[in-house]
Image (cartoon, rainbow, N blue to C red):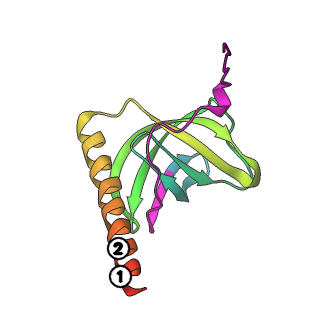
């Protein structure tokens, strides 16, 4: 049996586990001043946020700060818009992160994953 599978660039699978982090926002400095957007989900390789009205398009690059609980968590990060979905969801990949930024972001994502696993275990034990 012989067959080919073609994958469109838009249909690629995510490269990393994404999770939701309550209180995580991005701050983008624009001509109108700083704009904060809640992060819908985040991974070691990218994140998504919601923008209405849709001021971002696929391929755009921008610089931003990552805030946790309204406090600076990581600053001066770069991202590239990979997709713009219906309802204003903007999917981005991190660009040019240094080693320190990667480590700090990995720790955040891993900590959230651990807590989710603990919550699931506790829920199963309670059932």
The x and y percentages for residue 65 are 42, 49
Front position in the image: 36 or 109: 109
Q: Residue at x 65, y 38 (%)?
A: 83
* In the image: residue 70, left or right of residue 103: right
For the C terminus, give its image quadrant: bottom left
Residue at the disc numbered 2: 121
User: Label 2 crowding class (10 Å Cα cut-off): few <14, some 14-19, many 20+?
Assistant: few
The magenta region covers 1-27
The x and y percentages for residue 4 are 67, 16
> Which mark, by number, is residue 125?
1
Helix, strand or loop under label 1: helix
Placement of 82 over or under 65, stated as above or below: above
Q: Residue at x 55, y 40 (%)?
A: 92
Helix, strand or loop under label 2: helix
Q: How many dots with numbers?
A: 2
Q: Residue at x 67, y 20 (%)?
A: 6
For the residues labelled 1 and 2, the Cα–Cα distance comes to 6 Å
């Amino acid at each position: 049996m012989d067959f080919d599978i073609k994958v469109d660039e838009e249909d690629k699978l995510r490269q990393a586990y994404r999770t939701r982090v309550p209180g995580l926002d991005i701050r983008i400095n624009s001509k109108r001043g700083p704009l904060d957007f809640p992060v819908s989900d985040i991974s070691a390789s990218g994140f998504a946020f919601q923008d209405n009205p849709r001021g971002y398009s696929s391929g755009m690059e921008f610089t931003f700060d990552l805030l946790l609980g309204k406090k600076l968590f990581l600053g001066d990060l770069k991202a590239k818009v990979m997709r713009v979905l219906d309802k204003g969801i903007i999917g981005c990949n991190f660009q040019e992160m240094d080693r320190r930024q990667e480590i700090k972001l990995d720790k955040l994502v891993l900590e959230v994953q651990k807590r989710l696993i603990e919550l699931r275990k506790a829920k199963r034990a309670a059932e």
